[in-house]
Each structure stands twice: as C-alpha cells, then as structure tokens.
Image: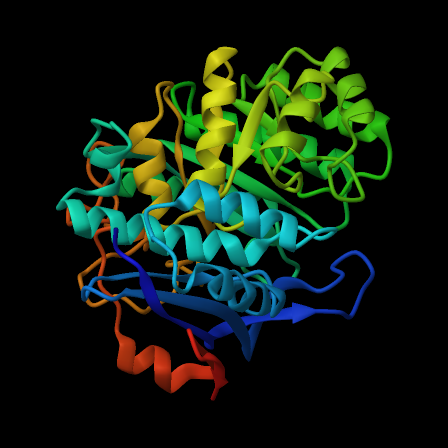
Amino acid sequence: MSLVDKVEIIQFNEDEPDYVRDFSSEDRSGSWYYTPGHTGSRGSLMVRVHTEDGLTGEYAYHATGGVSAIQAVDVARVLVGRDWQHRERLYRTARRMARPVHNYGLSFVDNALWDLAGKAYGASLTELLGGWRDRVRAYASTVNGDRNGSLSTTAQVVDFFAELQQAGWTGFKMHSWHEGDKWEEAENVRRMREVLGERAELMLDPACVFDSLSDAIFVGKACQDAAFRWYEDPLRPIGVGAHQHRALREALDIPILQTEHVAGPEAKADFLLAGGTDLLRVDAHYDLGVTGSLKTIKFAESLGVNVEVHGPSPVHRHLVASLQGTSLYEVANVSPHHSDPSPHIYTCGYSDDWTTIGEDGTLAVPTGPGIGVSYDLDLIKKLSVATWTVTGDGVTTG
C-alpha cells in the first residue's frame, strides 16, 4: 500500500499571440478568433500527486475554465490519505461528489495518477494499456475559419493544407467558418478533395454552426460525394441531441462523428445506442481522465465502433497507440499563424507543432515512464494565477 500525502494544483495562463476570444458577433460567440496584433490568454491546469514513499505523478494541459481547478481540489481532498492505486474507487467517489455537474477536475487528477502508476512500474502509459504502436498517424485540424486574412477563403484553406501536405501530413480537417453558409461550406469541401487528391484523409467539423437539419444534410452530402472520412458536429446548439443526429445519419451515407460535447461513458453509450452517431469521441480532459476514457473505448470496441480521440496531448498519443481499431491523432487547432496548439511547458522536447510531422505522416508516442514527458515547473509557477496544496491537514492556497 502506498498512500497519497499531498496534491498540488496549479492554475496558470499562457499567452496566445494573434488569437483572442471574440464576442463582437453572435456567430462567433466567444470563440478563439484570428486577430493580428492582439494577444489572448489561455487557461491551463497542472496536478501533481505526491506519495508518502517519494513518488510523484503529474499532468498539465489546457483546462475547461476555472471549474476544473476547483473540482480538482475537491477530488484531491478525497484522494489524500488513500492508496493511489485505487483509481476506480476514486473515480466512483468523485463522480458522485460532483453531482449534478460533470467532474472535469477528476480528469486531471486521474491522468496524474496514471502517470504515477507508470513511474512506479517503470512502464509507459502505452505499455500499461497493452498498446503496441510507437508512432501514431496524425491529421492537421484547423482553427475555425476567420475573416481577417488567415483562413478567410476556400483558397486560403486549401493552400494551407497543401503546404502541410508537402511537409508530410496525410490527413486534414477543416473547422468551418462561424457564419454557417452552406454554399461556402460545400464549395470548400469540393475544393479540399480536388486540391489534396483522392488519397488524402479529409474530415469536416462545422463546430455546430448550422441552425437547420436541411443545411447540415446539404453540406453532409458534399462531404459524402467527396469521400470524406467523417462528418462531425454540424448542428446547433452543441451537438448533444441523439434524436436530431439520428435523422442526420439516416439522410447521409457517410460516418457521423458525435459526442465531443457529450461527457462521460454512460452518456456516450446512450447516444450511440440511440442511433445518434456512427463513431464516438473521447477526450481525457473532458471524459474523466484515462480511466473514464477507457470505459468508453472498451464499450465501443465490444460493438466494433471506432473511437476518435479529440485534440492533442501526450496522453492522447498513448490512447491512440493503444486502441484496437485504427484511429487518427488530432493536432488541433492550427492555422498559418498558429503552428503548435499545445501548451509550451515541456522540457523534454515534446511538441504538437505541425512542423514536427514525420515523413510518413506520423508522430512519436512518448516512451518514458508514465505519460513520458517532463514539465518546466519554474515557468508554470511563474504563469500561475492560483495554487492549492491539499494535505491531511486541509487546503492551503496561494
């Protein structure tokens, strides 16, 4: 038995040059938007779990608002004084504790515990999960299109993807313009296939811009005709209604990918069984860490359903490396002015910069113990906006 004696939680912000959250129109509604000469601030979270016998498991990445940090503190209070190996027990307790909201904070604590497990056993996360891939095939996924000169037209989109293709990328996904113009979207789909060729893996994620099922079907048929790999989250408001997406599936002959915004394994299972999607999304930052993600993955695999992992991170490389089915690793969100979507906090050389792609269109999976990355703790502490330290004596803040 090895008990947790301290958990550190650090909330920090990183600058996002030339990108800010834009509230100037209802269409953009606070989305990150290319704005040259301005700098936004992106929230992130680090969790460090310390044991009484000197081990430390840690994880840091972009976080879903301040709620993740507050929830992580509560999860840490449950964890301190207990055996770190009892991840299922923590998962069970922390989920009930957070009702009726979803426990995003558990995700970060759970990821840190898996890092701790790998370090304790001298194995990478891929090895712990029984995976065998040491490289994962990746696709480049853009930020939403803008009107400020970065990805403002179909010509700019395909030119950018053609540049990435020359660098070694074989898969490409466009996040739509915020206006939801079905004619513009359908033309962009056609041009992507025409320019990038028949062997490129192409996807479209409108990011919930279409108000009507008919518009979503119109664009979906363009994706179908262009032999896209999948069509993802086209409908407002946030892609969580199984009924409307079942109607979308029945109207199209192309795989539909949903559940990015449907959090947790039970809700995803219900969505799939109700006929709302062909493929499932999972994210270790939204879906209760590695433990929660594995529950969705194993359920889907038992039905022969592919799971696509949402967004980049070292944990997600391990998950893709361990899946039974062939899935693609998403490097989102990139643009001609934003080459690396991940936090710049690593001291081990880890990067999701699109310039790091291999000649074969793959990216390496970290091989060190646990998650296999190391962090610049001095930088993270310098960028911190709030800290919590949880011990058996309570919680101290800084």
Residue 74, placed above or below residue 169: below
State the colouring used for the structure image: rainbow
- Depth order, front residue of 83/185: 83
Q: How many marks?
A: 0
- Depth order, front residue of 10/181: 10
- Left/right placement of residue 138 relative to residue 175 reads left
Residue 284 visible to an observer of this rendering: no
Q: Residue 123 is drawn in which quadrant?
A: top left
- Left/right placement of residue 227 relative to residue 162 reads right
Residue 397, placed above or below residue 225: below
- Depth order, front residue of 117/216: 117
* Residue drawn at point x = 34 percent, y = 53 percent: 83
- Left/right placement of residue 310 relative to residue 224 reads left
Question: In x, y percent, where is residue 389?
Answer: 42, 78
- Left/right placement of residue 330 relative to residue 3 reads right
Question: In x, y percent, where is residue 53?
Answer: 19, 64
* Residue drawn at point x = 54 percent, y = 43 percent: 92
* Residue drawn at point x = 54 percent, y = 76 percent: 41
Question: In x, y percent, where is residue 179?
Answer: 77, 49
Residue 201, placed above or below residue 103: above
Question: In x, y percent, where is residue 259?
Answer: 63, 34
* Residue drawn at point x = 26 percent, y = 55 percent: 2
Q: Residue 210 is drawn in which quadrant?
A: top right
Residue 298 visible to an observer of this rendering: yes
